[in-house]
Amino acid sequence: MRIRASIAAVVIALAAVVGTVVMGGAQDKTLSIGVLGPLSGGAASYGVELVRGAEMKADEINKAGGLKVGADTYRIKLVSYDHKALAADAATAANKLVFQDKVKYIIGNAVGATCNAVQTVTEPEKVLFSFVCWGTNNLGPDKPHSFRVMLSQWEVAEPFYRWVKEKHPQIKRVAAISPNDTSGKDTNTAVVKALKALGFEVAADEYYERGTKDFYPILTKILAAKPDMLDVAAAPAGEGGLILKQARELGFKGAKGWTAGTNPFTIIGVAGKDAAEGVWSPANINVRSDFVSATVRRFGAEYEKRYNEVPGVIAVANYAAFDVITKAMQEARSLDTDKVLAALTQKPFETVWGRLVIGGKETYGIDRQFLYPVVISEVRDGKVVDIAQVLPTALKK
Amino acid sequence: MSIDLLVQALLNGFGLAMVYVLVALGLTLIFSILEIINFAHGEFYMLGGYVTYYVFAVFGLNYFATLGFAILAVGLAGVVAERLIFRYLRGKTLNAFIVSLGLLWVMQASAQLSFGVLDKPVPSAFSGIVRAFGLVISVERLVVSLSAIVLIAALYLFLRWSRPGRAMRAVAQDADAAALQGVDIELVSALGFGIGCALAGGAGGLLAPVFAVSPAMGALPVVKAFIIIIIGGMGSLPGAVVGGLLLGSVEGLGSLFMGSAAVSVLGFLVVILALLVRPRGLFGGA
């Protein structure tokens, strides 16, 4: 009897050990996901938010026991590289991710020219690539594995300036200034197109080199054209803030916009409360506002607690992208990017933006653009206040 | 194009030129004494910016006291760098070039790890603008430019009249002859490197409230400093001042007529011209 009991105990112990090993083996599977972005330099705020948004979703999944795809469970491992907003560095980083780290998913990148560089690697290798880049040709029928998960200038500029015309009819002449690269050129092009279509005068359509700190020379030229409104269109917070600060020093008192204004909290910090007063940001998300869902407010609160900063739209967009793509993996019951792509485009998912709408065929020739309403916010006394919600044309349709 | 606009453009160009002259003077002082080109000079400028951020913006010390503190702290950091690294590389230009590049990356990466990668805004110490004859200049920039001029004048007086200043000039002219006259070369090297870095730190402190601080903030001023030195002549204080004003006016006026990409290469075009016409710079010696 004692021998039987001992054998039973040994069998149970062995079973427990074997079971643990099997379960452990299943949990030990790792899914590496790449995140790219400028993590240093003037556009670093973009990259930092991308990584943090991804980190929050990845940690959420890992804490819940991992990502169950078919019969397997994966721990998410993020692999991130800094490309300093430089196309050449972005291509190098993409090569590392795809051929060295063997990732099949890159969830996150910013700055248009770097996206083009990354796509030369991801598209031939069928790597699913989602980003917040503001380049027009970042999406197209020749780039089926690429998604933009945040509204771009082509969705934002027209409804924003339609709102300006309606609510502030005294504004007639608008000057736009952007970085001298793909994101900047495409943004100013979209802004100028919207301005002309809506009957505004384009007072200036100017570009500066990324990394510029002294904007006095270029602002002197712009302000000589006497604009009623200055749009720091595609400038990141670090540079946009300096432009606003220096424009004020040079005596500019007109209206201010930030078409690519992803996080007005950051521009207040750089420009100062007075220079940032009144800035309109149509690409922003205010995580403390009643305009956003409870999920976004909760995300915002957790983000602030963890990083001691208020998240902008890029952090929210990348969190949402991570959420949707991992859900699509589960739906496809596979990590094969073609199967995940099919799941992603065929089935509606619930996201922090509400029910996901992927559109953009009329602009880009393919439906790969996440669509959601535009919320226009204004800086008032150092605070960000949401003042209007408008719909991108593609979403109206 | 109105005269007002042209004068305003010139004023813009001159506005911060004196601060870049400070950076250039530090670089040229170090070269004169140690015969090395310190590519990490911009990182000492960055250190000055961060000292200003923490002492002025975070702890709320008076701005000018902060500036003095930044100059001292970065000067001390320069002395440490000279004692630990550059004293062994005196006269070895190529070795020093490689080592200073390495130091640049180490300091920049350390700053990223320690201070974060995002720009840190420093509140303006002086607000308001001055309007006169149709021209506009911010009080902040006026104070910054005047402070830079005071520092340049102080450096001139120190080098001209003080005993250590004369020793530095002697070493710059002929280190062996200076040593025979009893000048302590080790001490002068450390002092020269320290003062050179202190000037960069002062410039960083002056521009911190104007531009915000970040780990990569040293790249642009050091490029401008090299342009200024090449135009003005290595080792020449008046040359650096004239070079700075020339660069400021070319960039200021250029921005009225051409795009930013073209303006950013204007300085290099002036350098090419200077090297073709007067290879030792406007005030460079034989």
Image (tube, coloured by chain):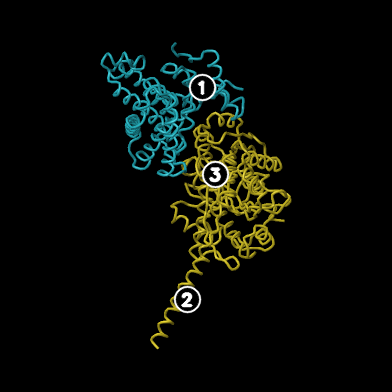
Chain colours: A yellow, B cyan
Question: In the image, A192: left or right of B282?
Answer: right
Q: Amino acid at mark 3?
A: Val
Relative depth, front residue between B77 and B33: B33
Q: Given the current orientation, which residue lies at the most extreme top position?
A: B286
Q: Given the current orientation, which residue lies at the most extreme bottom position?
A: A1
The chain carrying label 2 is A
Eye-nearest disc, 2 or 1: 2
Question: In the image, A137: left or right of B68?
Answer: right
The correct choice, above or below, for A194 with respect to B97 in the image is: below
Residue A15 - label: 2
Mark 2–mark 1 Cα distance, whole angstroms, equals 79 Å
Q: Position of residue B201 (x, y in %)?
A: 38, 31
The correct choice, above or below, for A162 with respect to B218 in the image is: below
Mark 2–mark 3 Cα distance, whole angstroms, equals 65 Å
Mark 3–mark 1 Cα distance, whole angstroms, equals 34 Å
Q: Which residue is mark 3?
A: A279
Q: Position of residue B38 (x, y in %)?
A: 42, 27
Q: Residue at x 35, y 14 (%)?
A: B174
Residue B247 - label: 1
* Residue B238 image-quadrant placement: top left
Kindly state the secondary structure of the residue where label 1 is placed: helix
Q: Quadrant of the N terminus of chain B?
A: top right
